[in-house]
């Protein structure tokens, strides 16, 4: 009876691990990525708003300054996103500010 119980326990644990690795881990990765993007979007909104209010440069120079500032913040926070994603978040923040 002990061998059968041990075999069933192994089967249950294996099934749980398979389900966890197949469904739970990818779900958590997606949620973490969404949270990270939302966090960076908030920082981008704040940076764009601050740049618009305080910096007296043209649009391209402001964008370069905001991009550099956001890169530095993301490095400090150990967050990595692509330059295209960062550019999109900055453009989105500018568009939201103008509306």
Image: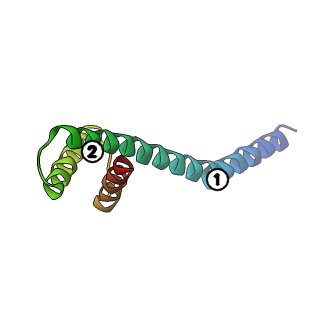
Relative to the observer, which residue lies in front, 87 or 81? 87
Instruction: Nearest to the eye among marks 1 and 2: give it.
Output: 2
Q: With respect to residue 41, does 54 lie above or below?
A: above
Pick whichever of labels 1 and 2 is earlier in the sequence.
1
Query: x and y percent of residue 49 in the render?
Result: 28, 41
The residue carrying pointer 2 sits among few (fewer than 14), some (14 to 19) or many (20 or more) residues within 10 Å by Cα, namely many
Distance, label 1 to label 2, CA atoms, is 38 Å
Relative to the observer, which residue lies in front, 49 or 88? 49
Q: State the quadrant of the N terminus.
A: top right
Relative to the observer, which residue lies in front, 36 or 78? 36
In this view, the residue farthest toward the bottom is: 84
In the image: residue 26, left or right of residue 60:
right
Residue 39 lies in what quarter of the image? top left
Q: What residue is shown at x 66% (from left), y 53% (from top)?
A: 18
Query: x and y percent of residue 52 in the render?
Result: 22, 43
Q: With respect to residue 13, does 61 lie above or below?
A: below
State the residue position of label 2: 48
Q: What residue is shown at x 21% (from left), y 51% (from top)?
A: 67
Query: x and y percent of residue 14 in the render?
Result: 69, 49
In this view, the residue farthest toward the front is: 99
Q: Residue 97 carries which label?
A: none
In the image: residue 40, left or right of residue 54:
right
Are the residues flagged by discs 1 and 2 in contact, CB closer than 8 Å? no
State the residue position of label 1: 23
């Amino acid at each position: 009876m002990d061998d059968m119980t041990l075999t069933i326990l192994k089967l249950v644990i294996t099934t749980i691990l398979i389900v966890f690795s197949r469904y739970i881990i990818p779900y958590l990765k997606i949620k973490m990525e969404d949270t990270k993007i939302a966090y960076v979007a908030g920082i981008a909104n704040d940076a764009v708003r601050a740049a618009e209010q305080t910096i007296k440069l043209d649009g391209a120079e402001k964008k370069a300054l905001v991009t550099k500032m956001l890169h530095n913040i993301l490095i400090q926070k150990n967050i990595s996103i692509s330059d295209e994603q960062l550019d999109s978040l900055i453009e989105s923040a500018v568009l939201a500010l103008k509306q």
